[in-house]
């Protein structure tokens, strides 16, 4: 149960930071830099925050040093993230599922998806990264 709680916390904290950074990106960076450059500028910050938050929560929730536990933590966080994005797209922007999925054809959205995959993989990657030390 602690593994799922860690995944929920990982999603919630990272989503909150992403929401703030995303708002800044859209309102401040995109008008001056364009969507792709703004996303490319934001992404390293999200990657760094995700890495740090993942490691902190692994310790905080005592997530076992097992691949299955880490994959569950990252998987729960990823499913919640994708669900939250879909819900926001529908509720805030009145987009259908098809319209939401159509957005993933842009380069900036592909960069975002790559960041989300990294976010989901970090708990498992950290298992490996810290075992080798």
Image (cartoon, rainbow, N blue to C red):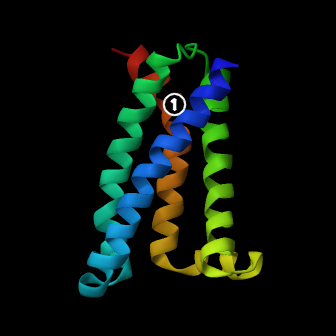
Could you say where residue 99 lies in the image, as x and y percent from the top left? 70, 82
Q: Pick out the residue farthest to the front.
A: 91
Query: Quadrant location of residue 25?
Result: bottom left
Count of numbered circles on the image: 1
Q: Which residue bears the numbered disc 1?
A: 123
Q: Quadrant of the N terminus?
A: top right
> Residue shown at 39%/19% (left/top)?
130
> Residue shown at 27%/77% (left/top)?
28
Give left or right: position of 24 versus 97. left
Could you say where residue 114 lies in the image, as x and y percent from the top left? 50, 58
Give left or right: position of 63 versus 36. right
Give left or right: position of 20 versus 41. right
Q: Pick out the residue farthest to the left.
A: 32
Could you say where residue 103 lies in the image, as x and y percent from the top left? 60, 79
Q: Is residue 122 above or below residue 130?
A: below
Q: Secondary structure at mark 1?
A: helix
Other residues around mark 1 within 10 Å, as few (<14) / some (14–19) / many (≥20): many
Query: Quadrant location of residue 2?
Result: top right
Give left or right: position of 31 versus 119. left
Query: Quadrant location of residue 105?
Result: bottom right
Q: Quadrant of the C terminus?
A: top left
The residue lying toward the viewer, choosing from 133 and 44, is 44
> Residue shown at 61%/41% (left/top)?
77
Q: Is residue 125 above or below residue 92?
A: above
The residue lying toward the viewer, choosing from 90 and 128, is 90
Q: Pick out the residue farthest to the right.
A: 97
> Residue shown at 54%/61% (left/top)?
113
């Amino acid at each position: 149960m602690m593994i799922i709680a860690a995944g929920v916390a990982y999603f919630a904290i990272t989503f909150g930071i992403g929401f703030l950074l995303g708002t800044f990106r859209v309102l401040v960076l995109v008008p001056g830099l364009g969507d792709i450059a703004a996303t490319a500028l934001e992404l390293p910050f999200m990657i760094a925050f995700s890495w740090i938050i993942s490691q902190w929560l692994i310790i905080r929730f005592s997530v076992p040093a097992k691949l299955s536990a880490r994959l569950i933590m990252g998987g729960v966080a990823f499913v919640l993230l994708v669900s939250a994005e879909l819900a926001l797209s529908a509720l805030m922007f009145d987009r259908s599922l098809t319209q939401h999925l159509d957005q993933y054809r842009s380069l900036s959205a592909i960069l975002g998806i790559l960041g989300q995959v990294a976010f989901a993989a970090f708990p498992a990657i950290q298992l490996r990264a810290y075992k080798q030390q």
